[in-house]
């Protein structure tokens, strides 16, 4: 338990479940994807077996030249020399000698590589720790390559992420054509396989296979070194750009400080700097003798074989010479940078002087333009104020004219309304009188008709009653009760007729009273309308008077405001003039005081001088006893 869960673990319980977790992941695959996953796992297993068989290769040797590459370079050098000799006309008998030497060198190199490979071979049974270390190293290399490829691809394609199939295909084709193919061609040169070297450019559909006799770990190490160099170059470029930008910022900061100091110290510089001749800067950089020094060092450190006529040099001496050349190159670059920086600093100073002169000229022109703008603005404002005053006067006159016309229109409307009202009132009165007369006539005629009809009815009733009496007398048939009824009906009819006549007279009286009441109401309405018209006229007159008074008050307020502004401007000008006069008086008083003080000093000095002279004379004169 302590070994599993203690502070210093020897076992990890989660490792026991790795196989189970992998089987679970593989169980979730589709049947179409199972063969591809199986092929990938088998390929990884085979590559790990090949890496264990080939053995470990040091990372430092992955980017260096191999022995085969050195022999290839020797072949190239010898072929160039033979071609030169052919051109010069040397005999062809020397070619087999060259071939024999090259074959011997290649055989020696092959033997060395075979021995090295036999020494580096590993096995999981014999050397498990070294084999598993090598496998771990290979897996870490593979992961580094993936990360570096991703970073290179994003920079090369100008994309933030490779998250689609289209971009991934594009990235694979670009990496294959630009990086992997060139790397394999260089490795084929080193391992003497010209078939790969002579291949044409690859297509997207072509299958790329690593050639034989080239260990995969070398390919991976070369990829890591190449990609790391590319990223290192990018970082160095970014650092250089950062340094350049920082230097520019510091230059700008220093120039700003210098400009501020000069502006503070040289506030009254002359404006005619453009008339003065400008400085002419010339740059003269000495040319270094790097090639001559390199040749001298090579000759001094090399060993000459008089028999073969060949110069040989050791690796340490060659590295020392290259180091010296690099130091001299960096020293030269530093000197040239200093020369160029001084040259550009002088140019910047000259340009600063010219720009300062131009800025002063521009500032003077701007001040002049500002003064002219102020003058033009004041003149335009005065003209505008005069025009506005004239327009205001015209507007006030037009408003007064409009008010007069409105009053005249209202008066005419009132007169017309009065005339119409009078005519209507007269016509209504006439109609009312006519209607009253007609109504009274109709009432009289109706009353007469009623009276006539009642009379005729009474006469007819009397005649009927007389006839009835005659008939009764003739027949001598009748009763006292019927006579009484007839008499009673006769009396009742008379009473009814009298009541009806009284009712008619009362109705006539009521109609007369109604007519009188309507006439009184109409007269009261007429008087009320007349009074309303008078009140409305008075109200309109009061409104016109109020508007006139408002306009006059507004005009007076404007005039008073203008007078106040003019008085304020005059007061400000007088105050400025008083301040100027006070300053001038103070200057004059100070000058007068200085003059008085100087005169007093002169008088005191003269007096002291005279006293000294008198004392000297007194001392020179001998004293007489």
Image: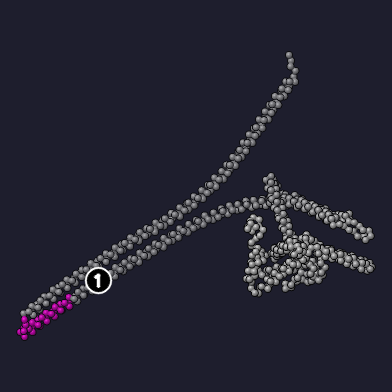
Q: How many marks?
A: 1
Would residue 69 be visible to someone looking at this image? no
Would residue 605 be visible to someone looking at this image? yes
Q: Is residue 149 above or below residue 285?
A: below
Residue at position x 44%, y 54% from top? 550
Q: Is residue 129 above or below residue 464?
A: above
Q: Which residue is mark 1?
A: 437
Report the quarter where the N terminus lies: bottom right
- Residue 460 colored in magenta in the image: yes
Report the quarter where the C terminus lies: top right
Secondary structure that dominates the magenta span: helix
Name the side, left or right, on which 28 lies relative to 308.
left
Residue situated in front as seen by the camera: 104 or 274: 104
Q: Is residue 34 above or below residue 390?
A: below
Indicate the position of residue 16 as horizontal and vertical percent values. 65, 64
Asked which quadrant contains residue 140, the reply is bottom right
Residue at position x 73%, y 20% from top? 619
Indicate the position of residue 582 as horizontal and vertical percent values. 59, 40
Name the side, left or right, on which 328 lies relative to 42.
right
Residue at position x 65%, y 34% from top? 594
**Residue furthest left as drawn:** 476
What span is in magenta? 451-479
Name the side, left or right, on which 137 lies relative to 388.
right
């Amino acid at each position: 338990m302590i070994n599993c869960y203690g502070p210093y673990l020897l076992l990890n319980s989660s490792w026991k479940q790795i196989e189970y977790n992998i089987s679970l992941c593989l169980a979730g695959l589709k049947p179409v994807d199972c063969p591809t996953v199986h092929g990938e796992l088998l390929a990884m297993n085979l590559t790990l077996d090949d890496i264990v068989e080939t053995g470990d290769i040091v990372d430092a040797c992955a980017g260096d030249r191999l022995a085969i590459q050195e022999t290839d370079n020797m072949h190239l050098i010898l072929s160039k020399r033979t071609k030169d000799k052919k051109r010069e006309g040397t005999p062809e008998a020397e070619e087999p000698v060259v071939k024999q030497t090259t074959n011997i060198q290649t055989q020696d190199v092959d033997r060395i590589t075979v021995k090295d490979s036999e020494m580096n071979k590993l096995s999981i049974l014999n050397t498990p720790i070294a084999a598993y270390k090598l496998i771990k190293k290979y897996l870490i290399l593979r992961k580094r390559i993936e990360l570096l490829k991703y970073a290179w691809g994003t920079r090369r394609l100008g994309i933030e992420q490779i998250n689609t199939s289209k971009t991934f295909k594009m990235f694979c084709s670009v990496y294959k054509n630009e990086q992997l193919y060139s790397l394999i061609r260089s490795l084929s040169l080193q391992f003497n396989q010209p078939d790969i070297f002579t291949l044409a450019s690859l297509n997207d559909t072509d299958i790329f296979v690593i050639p034989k006799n080239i260990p995969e770990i070398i390919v991976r190490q070369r990829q890591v070194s190449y990609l790391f160099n590319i990223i290192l170059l990018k970082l160095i470029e970014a650092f250089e750009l950062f340094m350049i930008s920082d230097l520019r910022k510091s230059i700008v900061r220093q120039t700003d400080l210098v400009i501020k100091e000069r502006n503070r110290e040289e506030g009254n510089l002359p404006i005619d700097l453009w008339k003065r001749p400008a400085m002419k800067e010339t740059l003269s950089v000495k040319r270094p003798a790097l090639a001559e020094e390199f040749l001298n060092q090579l000759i001094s450190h090399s060993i000459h074989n008089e028999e073969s006529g060949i110069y040989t040099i050791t690796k340490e001496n060659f590295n020392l010479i290259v180091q010296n050349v690099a130091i001299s190159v960096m020293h030269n670059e530093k000197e040239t940078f200093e020369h160029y920086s001084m040259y550009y600093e002088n140019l910047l100073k000259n340009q600063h002087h010219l720009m300062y002169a131009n800025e002063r000229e521009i500032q003077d022109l701007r001040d002049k333009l500002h003064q002219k703008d102020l003058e033009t603005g004041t003149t335009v404002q005065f003209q505008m104020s005069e025009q506005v005053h004239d327009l205001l006067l015209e507007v006030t006159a037009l408003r007064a004219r409009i008010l007069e016309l409105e009053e005249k229109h209202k008066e005419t409307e009132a007169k017309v309304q009065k005339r119409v009202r009078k005519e209507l009132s007269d016509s209504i009165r006439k109609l009312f009188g006519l209607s009253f007369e007609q109504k009274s006539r109709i009432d009289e005629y109706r009353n007469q008709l009623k009276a006539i009809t009642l009379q005729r009815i009474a006469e007819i009733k009397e005649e009927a009653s007389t006839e009835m009496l005659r008939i009764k007398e003739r027949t001598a048939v009748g009763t006292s009760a019927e006579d009484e009824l007839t008499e009673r009906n006769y009396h009742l009819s008379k009473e009814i007729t009298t009541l009806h006549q009284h009712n008619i007279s009362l109705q006539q009286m009521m109609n007369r009273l109604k007519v009188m009441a309507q006439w009184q109401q109409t007269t009261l309405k007429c008087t009320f309308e007349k009074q309303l018209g008078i009140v409305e006229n008075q109200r309109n007159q009061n409104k016109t008077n109020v508007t006139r008074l408002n306009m006059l008050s507004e005009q007076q307020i404007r005039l008073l405001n203008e007078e106040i502004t003019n008085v304020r401007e005059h007061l400000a000008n007088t105050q400025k003039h008083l301040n100027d006069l006070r300053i001038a008086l103070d200057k004059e008083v100070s000058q007068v005081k200085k003059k008085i003080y100087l005169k007093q000093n002169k008088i005191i000095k003269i007096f002291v001088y005279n006293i000294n002279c008198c004392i000297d004379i007194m001392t020179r004169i001998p004293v007489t006893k």
